[in-house]
Image (tube, coloured by chain):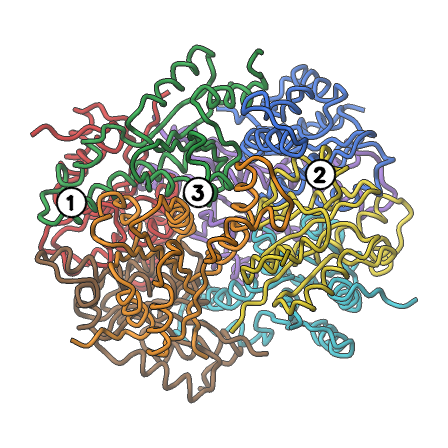
Chain colours: A red, B brown, C purple, D cyan, E blue, F yellow, G green, H orange
Amino acid sequence: MTKIWQVYLSGEIHSDWREQIETMTKQKKLPVCFTSPVTNHENSDNCGVAILGAEDKPFWFDHKGGKLNAIRTKTLMRNADIVVVRFGEKYKQWNAAFDAGYASALGKPLVILHSPQLRHALKEVDAAALAVAENPEQIVYILDYVINGNLPSA
Amino acid sequence: MTKIWQVYLSGEIHSDWREQIETMTKQKKLPVCFTSPVTNHENSDNCGVAILGAEDKPFWFDHKGGKLNAIRTKTLMRNADIVVVRFGEKYKQWNAAFDAGYASALGKPLVILHSPQLRHALKEVDAAALAVAENPEQIVYILDYVINGNLPSA
Amino acid sequence: MTKIWQVYLSGEIHSDWREQIETMTKQKKLPVCFTSPVTNHENSDNCGVAILGAEDKPFWFDHKGGKLNAIRTKTLMRNADIVVVRFGEKYKQWNAAFDAGYASALGKPLVILHSPQLRHALKEVDAAALAVAENPEQIVYILDYVINGNLPSA
Amino acid sequence: MTKIWQVYLSGEIHSDWREQIETMTKQKKLPVCFTSPVTNHENSDNCGVAILGAEDKPFWFDHKGGKLNAIRTKTLMRNADIVVVRFGEKYKQWNAAFDAGYASALGKPLVILHSPQLRHALKEVDAAALAVAENPEQIVYILDYVINGNLPSA
Amino acid sequence: MTKIWQVYLSGEIHSDWREQIETMTKQKKLPVCFTSPVTNHENSDNCGVAILGAEDKPFWFDHKGGKLNAIRTKTLMRNADIVVVRFGEKYKQWNAAFDAGYASALGKPLVILHSPQLRHALKEVDAAALAVAENPEQIVYILDYVINGNLPSA
Amino acid sequence: MTKIWQVYLSGEIHSDWREQIETMTKQKKLPVCFTSPVTNHENSDNCGVAILGAEDKPFWFDHKGGKLNAIRTKTLMRNADIVVVRFGEKYKQWNAAFDAGYASALGKPLVILHSPQLRHALKEVDAAALAVAENPEQIVYILDYVINGNLPSA
Amino acid sequence: MTKIWQVYLSGEIHSDWREQIETMTKQKKLPVCFTSPVTNHENSDNCGVAILGAEDKPFWFDHKGGKLNAIRTKTLMRNADIVVVRFGEKYKQWNAAFDAGYASALGKPLVILHSPQLRHALKEVDAAALAVAENPEQIVYILDYVINGNLPSA
Amino acid sequence: MTKIWQVYLSGEIHSDWREQIETMTKQKKLPVCFTSPVTNHENSDNCGVAILGAEDKPFWFDHKGGKLNAIRTKTLMRNADIVVVRFGEKYKQWNAAFDAGYASALGKPLVILHSPQLRHALKEVDAAALAVAENPEQIVYILDYVINGNLPSA
């Protein structure tokens, strides 16, 4: 009975890093089940009022949505074996950093993915991680090593 | 024997919001002990190499520092009754959002302090909070209410 | 391997809100396993003495029953990913509020379902929830969003 | 060094049961520190908007207040050795039942105080308690016994 | 997907109470998986030295065995949904009471099974239980009620 | 600031082993605060009905008392650094074994005190302990060693 | 539905003790799933730089690798029912002792495997274990006993 | 009210590194309370039999001692804010690595102290640490920075 590793992919939703990881993982036939926040940006923003009724104030519009998203993200992070958090170049991405802190306090192995330019701004987040990667390929190499002990061939 | 409330003040270190809160808290004679990360920016950046030896690569320079800071912040957050996190207008402040997530997973009551402009970017963080304030004065009012049941006089 | 979401439906047992939710969930083919307290009111009241022997005093009659019910409810809430608590118009429903507090302290995402008239009386309970819904349909929309990222079509 | 027992008194705020308990406890010189929610009903209702700004909708008016109250109650219940919850004849008192569930999941010894008429409605709450009392005097007797091993003289 | 309830049967190993429960549970087709300590008394006593080598002193003979048994019992109790502990008329059965305390501190629903004669000696153990039964049949009734909401027909 | 070690003395209440330990501990001026269950046997048996009202059935008479005792014992064991459990020659002493299991599951260092004759019956309990002593003097030696590193002079 | 026991085999990677255990376990058809750290020594040493990029300083070379290994070992130990740690004659094997401490604090049943010569050096580690074995065969006997109650035939 | 930081100093007992740290800490007037295992090597080896009676077999001689030492070390590590573990050049020091793993699983900030030569053998232990120092002076600098934000003057 092979263990299926649960890997939560948090953070940036405006590039295809998740698809890249999932494609390479499939090619390598790694026993991994990926989960993530809702990555449809519009739905993620509007979910609160779309389901629970309109709001005049933008704060409550956002609040209802932020909480619905938390039902999903809290549950999936608690279920995860490994939490990967991706920071992109744009936007504040505070929810990504929040997820990293949340996962860290739960004792989940944390992997951070970002370009070298973000190094200084992410130093406290990186300090809590067991690996800091620069590209999606490295995430798949990490999974292949962690699960099977394989290293990328030179 | 009065309970001394432990309040951790996380986040922005480039304005005097902590001093404002501490001054008003003293004026009101509230039984609060404030703690915070190291707020001397230069020391906070350099501590790793200053204590544990030089590094050529900026990543490890930052890594050593980020980890030393975590010794303090993890300990003080675990000791805290309440965690207040302030987001300013500038910088990425990912460590602030990380602290918010960390405190949330520990079950600590969380209070977020930021100007209304940051509302949308902070929606997931605010969604995890028990209060979202806009200025330091409100933090002191919250403490006075939470500790003594007092409300600000009109 | 699709995750089956475990959703505990606590509270009111005198209307068909559970059936409504279950029917709509099936129609949408959501991967959800619902659990609940024993909803046969008479059995739920009499179980203690029916199984463990008669009691003269009503207090012990109720006590034996309340504890047997707790074997089920504690176990199922601990197993749940999400806890939904429904408050109806009638009765005290203190066990529903007790369940909400219990789930909250376990860190379970909490969804509260009640009509707007009960707003003020439920403010502390609602304050602990990640969503407050008014009808069973919204619960299903929440599940569809949380699991699949779908929003109700306009 | 005598242990000071931390006892949280949750529930009804419209009778003087807390004062009765505190007065008798002082007379017996028991080493107990009592804490409670904010018992000023008006402040407790208005605190959210009084501190964090007005709201048009009653739901958010209540929501802001309910959350501020949670900062206090969560902290004090986590600090408590014993949690006592009083149910009166009037009102829904769902926050009292919520507190009982919350304390129970934290593993706190729970004592419930109510008149015999409320027996059936409170059976699940009573089932989670280590004592069910009918009057404040019994609470003080419980404390005197638990702390000193004394029983009330006949 | 029906939940299989994990029920640990601790205590007395010199009567057939486990077999009675298992037979009746099968007749009722309840989805229950029973586990228990090693009930072969001789093996349970001798396991330590039989596997890990002889001992001169009876204390270490017993110590090695007691610890091997703990590998099994700790694991199965942590896996259990419900822990049932049976006390017979004979022997000290301190390991049964130890298991009850262990399960209680883990927050497991606890059911105690003993004849009325043992009432006074077991009062602290019974006080921690959610049900106190007198015969194996009642245990099966409890399971049928807890799992399916069924009561024994009159 | 010297740490005061909290030591809970559970078990036998019909001999003066606690007094012996306390006297020797004072003579050695060890920084220890001892706690224990209520050791007045009569009060411990009668407390439930004396405080909470009479019962016809012996089961409920005992049940009320067992639960009041649990308020004290649960709290003091959770506060303890070390839990010592004494088994005497007489009586079933199931509450002592229950306490040992409870403390063990909480991760408390456990010390068991009994005469060699009880060895076999206590093997599972002893297997969970960090020390098994035969007389009160050894308990004090253990405390002196654990706190100060001192060994008894030959 | 037979429980598959999860057994983590930590420690020495330069002898075939794992293979011996796995072979004998298969012969006995025990329902056990073994996991382990990456046992390819070279990969285990080089993984950090092979995946995440070269390092000049040996400390960071090792640091990157040590952390990647921790993603695997932390996850598998948390998933394990039983943790077996093998100490060989050679090398420092501090990671083995680290794993033993880690597993112990998580409350996992711990089995230590080493030759008698290492007795004194391992006394604190052995003191935390539920069994101390000298050869792989004994580990399989332990599993057969713990799972099935069988003892090795004389 | 200044927080007194609890710092546990684990590991090597054959050099004066603890005294060096304590002396420098006093000179800097840092609010730190240091604790440690029993550092009298002879007492630490003999404590078991000296207190609990002689043993013929060296294994049980050591076992009794190892367990008594665990009463102290488990308690003090659970009480600690920070755990420092020192590895010297000589001996296996498996108890030091065990303590590091134990502290890590408890979520304690971990600081490792060793000379550069031990780098490779300690890579998994160092990977779990928030700082790796080479001399006692650096430990004091870490404490001064973590507590006061001070850096060593150039």
Q: Quadrant of the C terminus of chain F?
A: bottom right
x and y percentages locating residue G70 in the rendered image? 29, 41
Which residue has dot 2 on it? E97
Viewer-side label of 1, 2: 1
Residue C132 pos. (x, y %):
45, 52
Closer to us: E121 or F111: F111
Q: Quadrant of residue D60?
A: bottom left
Q: Which residue is mark 3?
A: C139
Disc nearest the viewer among 2 and 3: 2
- Which residue type does callout 3 highlight? Ile
Kindly indicate whether the residue at mark 1 contacts the one at mark 3 (C-beta within 8 angstroms).
no
**Residue at mark 1:** G61
Residue found at x 42% / y 86%:
B26
Q: Are marks 2 and 3 on the same chain?
A: no
Residue appearing at x 43%, y 51% in the figure: H106
Position in image of residue H14 (x %, y %): 37, 56
Residue A94 lies, in percent from the top left, at 24, 57
Amino acid type indicated by mark 2: Ala
- The chain identifier of the residue carrying mark 2 reads E
